[in-house]
């Protein structure tokens, strides 16, 4: 009986440490363009991390900025953690975290949107980016608009 309890506990810990994620969209930036936008509304919950994949192969090092318009809908998201990660190639299996930002939720029903812009000013050679949104607390938050921009730097 003790072994069953320990095995069940380890399986529960495994699932807790590996939260489910849902992809919102794959966006493509092809040279000479350096900008992409996703204007479709997306609702975030505290149950599932959601993310964008941006394929952005450039022949230059780039700095990145993403802008997101967030609106608290119901309940109380105490914050939303937003992680920008990069990959050098789509055959790579791991993502390298570039930056982490926490958005503090607003009072639902106030009609006040929050627009957040996050700049990574350190140029890098990543060709793919992943931006993950993870809500904490209980409630829902809407992404009203999402934008991603690269600033060309060193060749």
Image: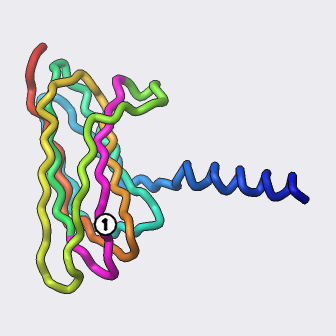
Closer-to-camera residue (36/134): 134
Between 93 and 90, the one lying in front of the other is 93
Please name the residue shown 25% across and 27% down the image.
57
Q: Which of the 4 image quarters holds residue 81?
A: bottom left
Name above or below for residue 74 compared with residue 148. below
Q: Residues within 10 Å of mark 1 (few under 14, many from 20)?
A: some
The residue sitting at 15% across, 19% down in the picture is: 60
Q: Determine if the magenta segment contains residue 73.
A: yes
Which of the image's four quarters has the N terminus?
Answer: bottom right
Residue 89's image quarter? top left
**Could you tell me residue 102's position as x and y percent?**
25, 55
As drawn, the residue found furthest toward the bottom would be 109
Q: Mainly helix, strand or loop, the magenta region?
A: strand
Where residue 141 sits in the image (x, y, percent)?
Answer: 29, 71
Q: Residue at x 32, y 71 (%)?
A: 77
Name, please, the residue furthest toward the top.
155
Q: Which residue is mark 1?
A: 42
Residue range corresponding to the magenta coloring? 71-88
In the rendering, at what x and y percent does residue 107 appear?
21, 80
């Amino acid at each position: 009986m003790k072994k069953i309890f320990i095995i069940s506990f380890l399986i529960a810990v495994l699932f807790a440490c590996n939260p489910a994620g849902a992809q919102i969209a794959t966006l493509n930036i092809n040279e000479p363009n350096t900008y992409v936008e996703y204007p479709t509304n997306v609702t975030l919950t505290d149950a599932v991390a959601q993310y964008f994949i941006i394929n952005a192969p450039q022949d230059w090092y780039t700095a990145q900025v993403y802008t997101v318009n967030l609106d608290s809908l119901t309940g109380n998201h105490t914050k939303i953690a937003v992680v920008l990660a990069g990959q050098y190639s789509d055959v790579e299996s791991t993502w390298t975290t570039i930056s982490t930002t926490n958005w503090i939720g607003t009072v639902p029903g106030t009609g006040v949107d929050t627009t957040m812009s996050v700049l990574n000013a350190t140029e890098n050679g990543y060709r793919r980016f992943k931006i993950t949104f993870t809500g904490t607390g209980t409630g829902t938050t809407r992404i009203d608009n999402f934008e991603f921009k690269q600033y060309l730097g060193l060749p």
